[in-house]
Amino acid sequence: MVHNIPAGPDGPKPLNTSPDGAPQAWLSRFPEPLCQSATGSLAGLRFAVKDNIDALGLPTTAACAEFAYAPTAHATVVQKLLDSGAALVGKTNLDQFACGLNGTRSPYGAVPNALDAAYVSGGSSAGSAYVVATGQVDFALGTDTAGSGRVPAGLNNIVGIKPSKGMISARGVVPAAQSVDCVSIFARTVDVAARVLQAARGYDPLDPYSRDLQLATRAWPEGVRFGVPSTLEFFGDVAAEQAFTQSIDRLRAMGGVPVSIDYTPLAQTAALLYESALVAERYAAIRPFFDAHEDVVIEPVRSIIAKGRQYSAADLYHAQTQLRAYGQQAARMWSSIDVLLVPTAPTHYTIAQMQADPVVLNRNLGAYTNFVNLLDYAAISVPSTLRADGLPFGITFIGPCGSDWQLAELGQRYHHATGLTLGATGAPLPAPQPVPGLVPSLVPPPIASTVRVAVVGAHLSGMPLNSQLTERQARLVAKTETAPDYKFYALPGTVPPKPGLLRVARGQGSRIALEVWEMPVVHYGSFVALIPAPLGIGTLQLNDGTCVQGFVCEPLALEGATDISAYGGWRAYIASLSPSHPTP
């Protein structure tokens, strides 16, 4: 027997509630998981689908009982996954008609956060994220128009892949805004999500927006250039702001090079989604049903969709031209970066807060997601940290169309560098695996459990601050020199005395002695936090041409500092302070 969503004159009723009546994430389930093949790349994995995706034998409701229908076939993507050996458990709750980013806009009840039930799960793919985070399935399908495959991942400590548009067929999916809709994937690890993507992808001539995409097969180098928005908004959430700063430091420690990018055209693009004629596509998606049954659609979904009626065809052309202009401006950033780093969500609200101010707070959650599909980018959200208050914080890597495998490889390396456990299960991360679609010989090795850092002053062996390394289980692995492109300064007024290292034009500097220490990556964040301004961590080039993370100094801090480059290192300079030591 199949559990169906009840409908009728009394309206929708929550299904599968817990004993205390709290609504759960499931809307319908098979009595036993549906399995059509015992072999294939996904054999042994169980999955769920968001209830705007057709699964033969279960109703499709889009979280509106009056809209519900019985599909005559599986959605193309569901059939592909079944053919690959995965077993379908059932269908999950969502913000009605996939209109929302918070998980509270369902007549079947709000889906709680998997780690703290007082907080929102994120939406619209709320139920799919919840059942993955709590370990009820191995992966789940969502949809993503404005961030619904990323925000729930970031808020529930799981992985969310938002593929390039058209990479996965959307035939058999109730559209939200069909030209920018994507089927998305939730999993607890990048490995599982990437394997699902490999099985699900493929051109579908019966989907008008399907594309036969050529994907990049070369992983980004360890020195990946990652963009960071020039202006960041966290809506007063200091914990989220600190968590994002930590993510930048971690990516630096992995060898990445941060590059500030102008966020203005991306923010302007995001605003178009709901504040221009582009919102008319939301109305067009369900126009016959909405015109006949507008009164059964819940607020604020009803008002958002109804807004699409007010625009003319001329308004739509104007909005599309604006979108193209913003896209041209935004495209300039790809000449200086490989990938864009943003918070998946800028803050985290309680269910009560969201229900008290559902439009404004929902819009806030999409501050870093709304532009991605409009500009034809790919993205992956991965866990980054658990904040001091215990709430998850995720980051999103965004790349050009076709960068899906590159994003997965970088996302996996980053996720494993966090040391986090899986979702809300408490289980440890398994070993990283090769990403399908990448040429094996070009894939850099998985991130090690250690990070190397070069020190040039008070952290050297036997110096006053060396204990900050040794107490973090760091070990000395090399004594060497920088490339001959650095100036070395004794900073005034520092206690204990500290030097500043500044890179200069090639051939205009000196080789400076240094030590390379290797530290467990789990301790690196606390080490970096001890570094006072004007010092910081940057990328140093060694005399053999390789690069390593190490201490650098802000140029403005060198005013009044003494140039000690001629000594060739801090030890020689300290020794020179002895009255019997000659000046070089």
Image (cartoon, rainbow, N blue to C red):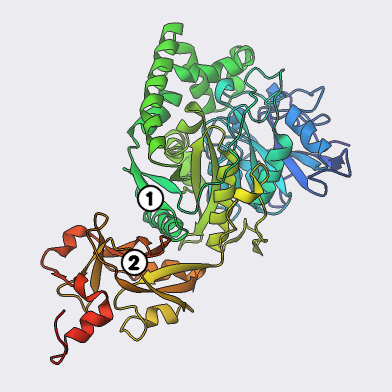
**Which residue is disc 2 drawn over?**
482
Give the percent coordinates (x, y) of residue 133.
64, 52
Give the percent coordinates (x, y) of residue 373.
51, 30
**Which residue is disc 1 drawn over?**
258
Q: Amino acid at mark 2?
A: Thr
Give the percent coordinates (x, y) of residue 424.
63, 57
Q: Between 284 and 416, which is closer to the camera in this rendering?
A: 416
Q: Looking at the figure, which quarter contains the C terminus?
A: bottom left
Residue at 54% of width from left, 32% of height from top? 401
- In the rendered image, the vertical position of residue 450 relative to residue 219, given as above or below: below
Tell how many labels. Answer: 2
Secondary structure at badge 2 equals: loop
Residue at 58% of width from left, 28% of height from top? 165
Q: Amino acid at mark 1?
A: Pro
Answer with left or right where residue 487 lies relative to residue 225.
left
Q: Residues within 10 Å of mark 1 (few under 14, many from 20)?
A: many
Q: Between 1 and 478, which is closer to the camera in this rendering?
A: 478
Answer with left or right where residue 199 lies relative to residue 238.
right
Answer with left or right where residue 374 lies relative to residue 140.
left
- Point out the residue furthest to the left here: 560
Secondary structure at badge 1 equals: strand
- Looking at the image, is mark 1 or mark 2 earlier in the sequence? 1
**Are discs 1 and 2 less than 8 Å apart at CB?**
no
Res 265 quadrant in image: top left
Residue at 46% of width from left, 68% of height from top? 452
Q: Residues within 10 Å of mark 2 (few under 14, many from 20)?
A: many
